[in-house]
Image: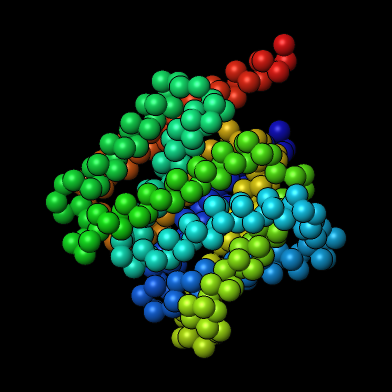
Amino acid sequence: MKSLRIAWILLLGGASIYGGIFSANKLVSEAGVPFIAYTFWQALIGGLMLLVVGIITNNLPKLTSEHIISYIITALLGIVIPILILTFIGNRLPASIIALAYTLIPGMTFIFAVILRLDKPRWLSIGGLVFGLIGVSVLLLPKGTLPANNSVLWVLLALVMPVLFATNNVYIAKVKPPKANALMLSTGLLLTAAVVTFPIMLASDGIYLFWQTSSSTTWIIIWTGCINMVSFFCMFEIIRRAGAIFFGQYNYVIVISGIVWSILIFNEILSFWFWIALASMLIGLYLSNAGTNQSIRELSKKSSQ
């Protein structure tokens, strides 16, 4: 019971904090910070803060070949490429609309799991995917829902994020990451993301020192490092304490908190069609999570027989 209570605190806290990253990306993009350099610094800051905690508590990330391969693949699919996309489109779409993309992660995961025969078609998951696509259509089709500056193109690019996260989920389910605690895994992932992004930053922007920007932008970049530190640790610890099904609720809180952050910071005025899309996509998220729950229950029954 205590473990579940802690998992709830981590879920509500971690996802609420992570929801702020959409608004932070928009602020940093508007300040003119190169998006590759920004991706590097937020991963490095978060990773170094976790590394300090790891040194103090003697929980340094493991560096076997198995761990390093897992860090690289998961960092690319779950951190580097999604954050590059998030940052690139940060000032091109309202932060609240970008947050909606996270509702599609369970549905996309289901599609890939069926293709790889990790799961079978089930009506709940199909229904979740349908409601998610209806929500996307509601965003794209009616006039006045999106800004006029090639927004459909940017929404389509935002939809690459749930594809990447879903691919990462299926990779984890298929390959099984090596054993390590939440602090080790989150530290390894963020530092690997920084190492991978560093040469790309050098080629694109040279040595970009974020503290030479305005003081407000500097603190926002430090804030995003803190967001990554907290949210990735919470993610692994929630899965350890309560399992993957419970963690599926993380996306609900991310979407809702992302909208709240965008309203508080930018005073975004959201159209009627946005709220229809949100309702449809949250229904889709609920059905997709229910389908995942059903799948795991069936697997548990088979393993106990």
Q: Where is the N terminus found, in terms of image quarters?
A: top right
Q: Give the camera-side residue of 118 and 161.
A: 118
How many marks are shown on the rendered structure? 0
- Rendering coords of residue 182 (x, y %): 72, 50
Q: Residue 261 falls in which quadrant of the image?
A: bottom left
**In the image, farthest residue toward the top:** 305
Tell me if 173 is positioned left or right of 153 in this view: right
Residue 108 visible in rendering: yes
Give above or below for 34 relative to 277.
below
Give above or below for 231 relative to 56.
above
Q: Give the camera-side residue of 78 and 49.
A: 78
Q: Residue 277 falls in which quadrant of the image?
A: top left
Give above or below for 141 relative to 187.
above
Tell me if 50 is positioned left or right of 269 in this view: right
User: What's the residue at 36%, 75% (across, down)?
Assistant: 30
User: What's the residue at 72%, 56% (across, down)?
Assistant: 68
Residue 230 visible in rendering: no
Q: Where is the C terminus found, in terms of image quarters?
A: top right
- Rendering coords of residue 293 (x, y %): 55, 26
**In the image, farthest residue toward the left:** 143
User: What's the residue at 41%, 42% (across, down)?
Assistant: 103
User: What's the residue at 22%, 61% (across, down)?
Assistant: 150
- Rendering coords of residue 241 (x, y %): 70, 39
Q: Give the camera-side residue of 233 and 120.
A: 120
**In the image, farthest residue toward the bottom:** 212
Tell me if 128 is positioned left or right of 113 in this view: left
Tell me if 60 is positioned left or right of 209 in this view: right
